[in-house]
Amino acid sequence: MNIESKIVNGLERLSEALKALLWEKAKTYGISPIQIQILLFVAKHKREICNVSYLAKEFNVTKATISDAVRVLIKKEYLEKDYSPTDNRRYNLLVTSSGEDLVQQLSGYADVFNKELSSFNEQELANIFDTLSKLIFQLNQKGIIQVQRTCYNCKYYSGDKKENHHCNLLNSKLKGDEIRIDCDEFEG
């Protein structure tokens, strides 16, 4: 087995571990893993991208799947609709106060990963992060990852994607570990 295949197998194992952690929380709180992901996403991102269409792209599932999950989260009063003032068919999602309470309880679902990663030295972590961010960018360029809010794909980024990173919005040079994979200021 070549090294690329071994890495893919390793990434698959990590993905399965994250799914298992999500399922554990889902069973505890009586909601599905996708509902947890939606709730956490809406809590952490700008209102403008918290809608069914964007969430379907973000999680690479159908709009119907997202709509069903959102319907349950609204019924359980964890999310609410914020209708457009110009078109009442369009809405964005907002987290309710009871949703915020749940977000606090759910947000640490992957803390075991953080704990294990803390055993690596700074250079090892920087190398892992650099490799993952470049892989995500390349998969996005091929259309495999639909949504990417990383520096490499942002209109404010300039650099060579190797070591000379610059954010024109912040007007500052970025170190490799300052590259963001999920940036709030991202603009494509």
Image (cartoon, rainbow, N blue to C red):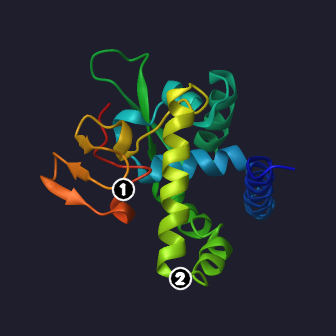
Residue at image point 78% right, 51% down? 12
How far from the left and from the top, in percent, is residue 15? 74, 53
Which is more toward the observer, 153 or 52? 153
Residue 147 visible in the picture = yes
Where does residue 112 sit, x and y in percent of width and height? 68, 75
Mark 2 residue type:
Asn
Residue occupying image coordinates x 48% and y 75% = 123
Disc 2 target residue: 121
Query: Camera-side residue: 176 or 81?
Result: 176
Whichever of callouts 1 and 2 sits on the residue coming sooner in the sequence is 2
Please, which residue is most extreme toward the right here?
1
State if disc 2 and disc 1 touch (CB < 8 Å): no
Residue 113 lies left or right of residue 89; in this view the side is right
Crowding at dot 2, Cα within 10 Å, few <14 / some 14-19 / many 20+, comes out as few
Quarter occupied by residue 103: bottom right
What amino acid does circle 1 point to? Answer: Ile
Can you say whether 69 is above or below 118 in the image? above
Give the SS element for disc 2. Answer: loop
Report the side of 8 relative to 122 (left or right).
Answer: right
Choose between 12 and 25: the one closer to the eye: 12
Instruction: For the C terminus, give its image quadrant.
Output: top left
Report the disc number at residue 153: none
Q: Position of residue 16 (x, y in %)?
A: 80, 55
Which residue in the protein does label 1 denote?
179
Q: Residues within 10 Å of mark 1 (few under 14, many from 20)?
A: many
- Give the residue at x 61% y 36%: 59
Separation of marks 1 and 2 at Cα, in angstroms:
18 Å
Q: Residue 170: x percent and y percent?
A: 16, 53
Question: Mark 1 falls on what kind of element?
Answer: loop
